[in-house]
Amino acid sequence: MTTRRRVTRTGTDQAFRWAKFATSRYAKALKPLGITNFTDYEGQDGHPDLKGFGDGKRAFFWLKEGKPDPQAVHVGFVAKNHAEVDAFYKAAIGAGGKSKEAPQARPEYYPGYYATWVFDPDGHDIEVVHKS
């Protein structure tokens, strides 16, 4: 018997120039879906500024400050707890991934934010997060 588990996506981001014009275009295009630009993240220590779009409770689509790059893909998954974040990191490294950031608390992103980031063998940025 196989047990299947639903995987929840935390979000995706793509590097677009998010001048007022880009942000307003996305705001208009996503409005019929009930998705709005409701949160901004001021980057620190080299992290780019972000514009967060979502349902008003949770951001799940981000525009990132920077030069557009169609290959700049970031995929995120939600873990049930810190142990799952840690287990993912160990498994991903064991499967040939490269560490971007080891599992750790990141309160500068969000209170209770615990995450890890790895690059898969093709260079995609994969994040696994638990928010408590």
Image (spheres, grey):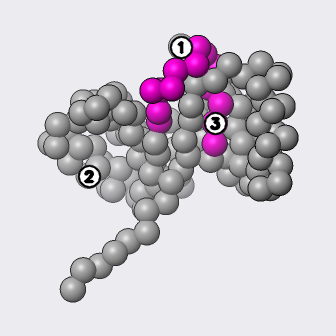
Q: What element carries label 3?
A: strand
Which residue in the protein does label 1 denote? Answer: 46
Identify whether 109 is placed above or below 48. Answer: below
Which residue in the protein does label 2 denote? Answer: 87
Q: Nearer the viewer, mark 3 or mark 1?
A: 3
Residue found at x 52% / y 21% = 69
Q: How crowded is mark 1: few (under 14 residues within 10 Å), some or many (20 or more)?
A: few
On the image, the x and y values in percent for residue 86 come to 30, 48
Q: Is residue 38 visible?
A: no
Q: Can residue 68 be seen in this view?
A: yes
**Label 3 sits on what residue type?**
Trp
Quarter holding the N terminus? bottom left
Q: What element carries label 2?
A: helix
On the image, the x and y values in percent for residue 89 come to 27, 43
Identify whether 12 is placed above or below 71. Answer: below
Residue 132 magenta-highlighted: no
Which residue in the protein does label 3 denote? Answer: 62
On the image, the x and y values in percent for residue 31 come to 83, 49
Residue found at x 68% / y 19% = 17
Mark 1 or 2 closer to N-term?
A: 1
Q: Give the range drawn in magenta.
A: 61-74
Tell whether 20 sits left or right of 68.
right
Q: Residues within 10 Å of mark 3 (few under 14, many from 20)?
A: many
Q: Is mark 1 on a helix, strand or loop?
A: loop
**Label 1 sits on what residue type?**
Gly
Tell me the CA gap for discs 2 and 3: 26 Å
On the image, the x and y values in percent for residue 84 come to 33, 56
Q: Residues within 10 Å of mark 2 (few under 14, many from 20)?
A: few
Tell me the CA gap for discs 1 and 2: 28 Å
Q: Are marks 3 and 1 in contact (CB under 8 Å)?
A: no
Residue 83: quadrant of the picture:
bottom left
